[in-house]
Image (spheres, helix red, strand yellow):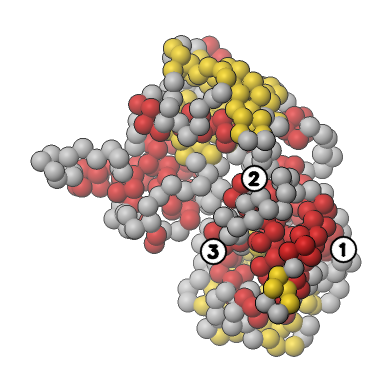
Amino acid sequence: MSVAEISPLLLMRGIHKRFPGVHALKGVDLELRSGECLALLGENGAGKSTLIKMLGGAHQPDEGEIRLHGKSIQIQGPQDALAAGVAVIYQEFNLVPWLSARENIFLGQEPSLIGILPAKKERSRARELFSQLGVDIDPETLCRDLTVAQQQIVEIAKALATNARILVMDEPSAALSQNEIEGLFTVIRGLKEKDIGIIYISHRLDEIDTICDRATVLRDGEYIGTSKVGELSREELIQQMVGRSIEQEFPKERAEIGSTLLLAKNLYRGKKVRDVSIEIKSGEILGLTGLVGSGRTETARILFGADMAESGSVYLDGQPIDLHTPRDAISAGICLLTEDRKSQGLILPQSIRENFGLPNLARYSSRGWINQETERNAFNRHAEKLLIKMTGPEQPASNLSGGNQQKVVLAKWLERDARVLLFDEPTRGIDVGAKYEIYQLLNRLAAQGKGILMISSELPEVLGMSDRVIVMHEGRIKGEITDVGKATQEDILRLAVA
């Protein structure tokens, strides 16, 4: 039986949700069928997260109806959602760091016999789930000791362990390698065969084409439409999401490439970085890619002074520099946009203005006092250029969408007028409209003579925006691609798995 012939598993009709000063959802509809994978698309701030939080019991609608198996239901909290057979994998991890992978998977589900938890049974089931996902993780490893990709796998296993009939995945592949993503897709196909309905949120449109059956688009809290995957062209789908035409997904502009700004020679740090040499020239966007765990982020952390190299040297404008701390790098004009902006790039409870000002306090302070007006005016100049959507500079950074959080991190480094910018996954978890704006910013920075290292696991992005590409594998550079225009994703993958 085709997906089109299967009756709706879930219906959400006329959903409204208001927060103080914000009408987040304005009569949104969503229909999910048994055995289908439905893409939920839209820019950051379109209302996707608010909608799925209603399914997960974190929010309740002000108006509208939710029907499951044809019956109207009320989801007042997370336990109601689980009882109804709904499991949500949120974009932000919901793991207890000091508990094991096994304990996190079965937290809240632990059946006991005379007060004894069946750890052996749980361990066996955890291994079975990990095997289905195509990974080998020791169930007894503490979550704090797992990589970001492994923690994401635990989140997925945790949701699968509930035997849910509806599974919501919010950016589940953001931190996964290509092999892990393929494992995830294999699991999704298996779940579809069991008539489980899946709502899949991703900004990677290639994934939508691969795994989803239909796509529902939201924009500015409103329902735009639903179509079969492949029915609309990529350009038409993007236009629905952003409300305007984007002529080219990767608007690469060639800047004049000048002399070498930053040169790193023979960097070593344990097994993560082994004999790595990198040259970044003015006006150049140098792509750095490889599988998760290849040493990309570790290399950037050395160049930013966050980690010390065991050996090797770094030169700026031909002069050797010592990078013992990030302060040394910032003073030298080297800045890093971290892979995880929420935990490493921002202090979420603090205001946007305060986050912007942190690396720039010397400019706004005198005798220990910060001139908040000067700081605010400086930020507003960048906010206008970067099109940051906010209620104001005093808004907590935690209340911004992912794309706007990334722009705040960008703003603080632009204020430093850094000469070398290290972008680690600059568009991860960001919608196509915000991606386009960041690509345009990369072009402007290159045109100003900045040197840019762009670390990305999205191969179309690497090929679309880089002047050169270097590929890492197991801590080493395995190759360099200079004629990017003629290169393919397969060319990169061959080097990445060498």
- Which of the two discs, 2 and 1, sits closer to the camera? 2
Residue at 34% x, 58% y: name it.
Answer: 98
Whether residue 121 is visible here, answered yes or no, is yes
Q: Which mark is residue 294?
A: 3
Q: Quadrant of residue 476?
A: bottom right
The earlier-in-sequence mark between 3 and 1 is 3
Q: In this view, does 161 lie above or below 406?
A: above
Q: How crowded is mark 1: few (under 14 residues within 10 Å), some or many (20 or more)?
A: some
Residue at 39% x, 62% y: name it.
Answer: 145
The earlier-in-sequence mark between 3 and 2 is 3
Looking at the picture, which amino acid does disc 3 mark?
A: Ser
Camera-side residue of 148 and 125: 148
Q: Position of residue 269 (x, y in %)?
A: 51, 77
Q: In which quarter of the image is the C terminus?
A: bottom right
**Gap between marks 3 and 1, in whole Å?**
30 Å
The earlier-in-sequence mark between 2 and 1 is 2
Q: Which mark is residue 401?
A: 2
* Residue identified by numbered label 1: 447
Residue at 51% x, 62% y: name it.
Answer: 293
Looking at the picture, which amino acid does disc 2 mark?
A: Ser
Q: Where is residue 71 in the image (x, y as percent from the top left)?
A: 44, 12
Secondary structure, mark 1, is helix
Q: Where is residue 396 in the image (x, y as percent from the top left)?
A: 62, 51
Q: Which mark is residue 206?
A: none
Q: In this view, does 235 lie to the left or right of 43?
A: right
Looking at the picture, which amino acid does disc 1 mark?
A: Ala
Q: How crowded is mark 3: few (under 14 residues within 10 Å), some or many (20 or more)?
A: many
Q: Position of residue 202 (x, y in %)?
A: 60, 39
Secondary structure, mark 3, is loop
Camera-side residue of 411 and 128: 411
**Gap between marks 2 and 1, in whole Å?**
28 Å
